[in-house]
């Protein structure tokens, strides 16, 4: 396959990816505006709440379509123009060692990508989200978040790039196996380190004060034989009025993290239902299964990287000056999305199945009415799309729609064991 054929194939796949996304978005945009509400949803939304949910959903969809269109067209233009090859040639002339040349090249590409997304981030945060009453972020917080993210990316990215180069140098044709194993281990390690050292860089976590809610959470955890390392409230309201809750960490170090907005919006039984849902993911081994799939995906990705490394046409397609490690990583980043976009609904379907199972677990542990009411309040407070198009939700939704989740709880009987 020639370089021109590879480039043409890439453009076709990227175009199909964008076109299909826009078709689905248009269907969902129309559905969000006028499709009848599911029976179980209509009973829990008044006219004002419905209007806000429909309007906010359509605004998010329109903005997302614009962002993906502009971003994709700019990336395709850069890919076709030969700009990447010219940039590589310029850095080759500096006479740097391969690692530092690669680092400089990748840093430039990542910086350009970040700059491309900057105006969309600003508009989303300070216009769209604020217009609909969600964003509470100040420009200072937004800026500091960005700078911290850049610093963290550099602190992690530079050593990881050095490690990858070391495997390529020392492990011969098996470098991808060693790299996949090492990076999978690092991924697991970061899940342990994240709640203790990384998350506090961006948010404040305070121990949940003693009282009814704290006691009820510990009682729930003991009753479900679930070890909790601590219960914390995160200052999510400093950035947004959206709400959430999650577990983080591994083993006995698992932490319960509640957004302060969630604590304010839900009653005790509803918070317990949300946490029981998260415990259900653990009890049904969803987290373990996801980790295994992530490790398998890592090995597949490194194997694909290994195959791509010895394919000259892939470099020529994007006007690179011959094979190089930095070119390999950029080519992989360009083609991996368009080449695998058709797998999206498979992972979405798998994720939704896990969500149904976790909902059923929570309904048995705390009661169907509490679980249903928690879901209703969270969707209502977040102004989630009340009537998504079935094809859009099938393709993209990692969670079932509210109507589907409520109906599933009803079918299960909705009562605790």
Image: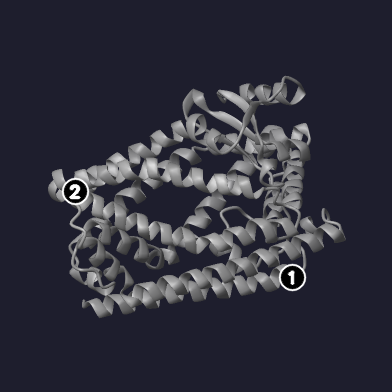
With 230 as the anchor, is 366 left or right in this view? Answer: right
Disc marking residue 305: none
Which of the 4 quarters of the picture holds residue 304? bottom left
Disc marking residue 168: 2
Query: Mark 1 sits on what residue?
Result: 33
Disc 2 crowd, CA 10 A, few/some/many (<14, 14-19, 20+): some
Q: Nearer the viewer, residue 31 or 124?
A: 124
With 119 as the anchor, is 103 left or right in this view? Answer: left
Q: Position of residue 92 (x, y in %)?
A: 21, 62
Q: In this rendering, is residue 237 above or below 338?
A: above
Disc 2/disc 1 C-alpha distance (Å): 52 Å
Q: Position of residue 387 (x, y in %)?
A: 71, 64
Q: Position of residue 156 (x, y in %)?
A: 38, 41
Which of the 4 quarters of the picture holds residue 255? top right
Q: In this rendering, is residue 134 above or below 73?
A: above
Element marked by disc 1: helix
Quarter occupied by the C terminus: top right
Which of the 4 quarters of the picture holds residue 272? top right
With 49 as the anchor, is 352 left or right in this view? Answer: left
């Amino acid at each position: 396959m020639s370089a021109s054929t590879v480039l043409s194939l890439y453009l076709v796949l990227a175009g199909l990816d964008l076109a299909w996304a826009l078709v689905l978005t248009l269907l969902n945009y129309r559905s969000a505006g006028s499709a009848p509400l599911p029976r179980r949803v209509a009973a829990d939304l008044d006219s004002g709440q419905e209007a806000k949910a429909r309007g906010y959903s359509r605004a998010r969809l329109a903005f997302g379509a614009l962002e993906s269109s502009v971003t994709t067209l700019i990336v395709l233009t850069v890919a076709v123009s030969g700009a990447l090859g010219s940039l590589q040639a310029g850095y080759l002339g500096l006479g740097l060692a391969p690692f530092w040349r690669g680092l400089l090249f990748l840093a430039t590409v990542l910086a350009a990508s970040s700059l491309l997304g900057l105006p969309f981030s600003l508009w989303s945060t300070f216009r769209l989200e604020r217009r609909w009453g969600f964003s509470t972020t100040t420009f200072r917080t937004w800026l500091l978040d960005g700078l911290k993210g850049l610093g963290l990316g550099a602190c992690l990215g530079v050593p990881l790039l050095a490690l990858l180069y070391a495997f390529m140098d020392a492990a011969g044709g098996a470098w991808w196996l060693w790299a996949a194993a090492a990076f999978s281990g690092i991924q697991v390690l970061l899940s342990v380190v994240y709640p203790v050292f990384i998350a506090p860089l961006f948010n404040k976590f305070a121990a949940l004060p003693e009282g009814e809610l704290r006691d009820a959470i510990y009682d729930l955890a003991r009753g479900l034989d679930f070890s909790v390392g601590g219960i914390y409230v995160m200052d999510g309201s400093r950035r947004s009025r959206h709400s959430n809750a999650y577990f983080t960490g591994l083993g006995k170090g698992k932490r319960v993290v509640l957004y302060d907005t969630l604590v304010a919006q839900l009653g005790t039984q509803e918070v317990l239902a949300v946490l029981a849902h998260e415990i259900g993911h653990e009890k049904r081994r969803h987290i373990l299964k996801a980790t295994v799939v992530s490790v398998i995906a890592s090995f597949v990705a490194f194997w694909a990287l290994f195959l791509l490394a010895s394919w000259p046409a892939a470099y020529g397609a994007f006007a690179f000056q011959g094979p190089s490690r930095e070119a390999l990583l950029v080519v992989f980043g360009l083609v991996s999305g368009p080449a695998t976009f058709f797998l999206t609904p498979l992972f979405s379907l798998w994720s939704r199945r896990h969500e149904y199972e976790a909902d059923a677990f929570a309904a048995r542990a705390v009661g169907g009415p509490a679980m249903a009411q928690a879901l209703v309040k969270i969707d209502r407070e977040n102004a989630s799309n009340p009537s998504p198009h079935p094809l859009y939700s099938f393709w993209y939704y990692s969670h079932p729609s509210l109507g589907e989740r409520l109906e599933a709880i009803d079918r299960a009987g909705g009562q605790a064991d």
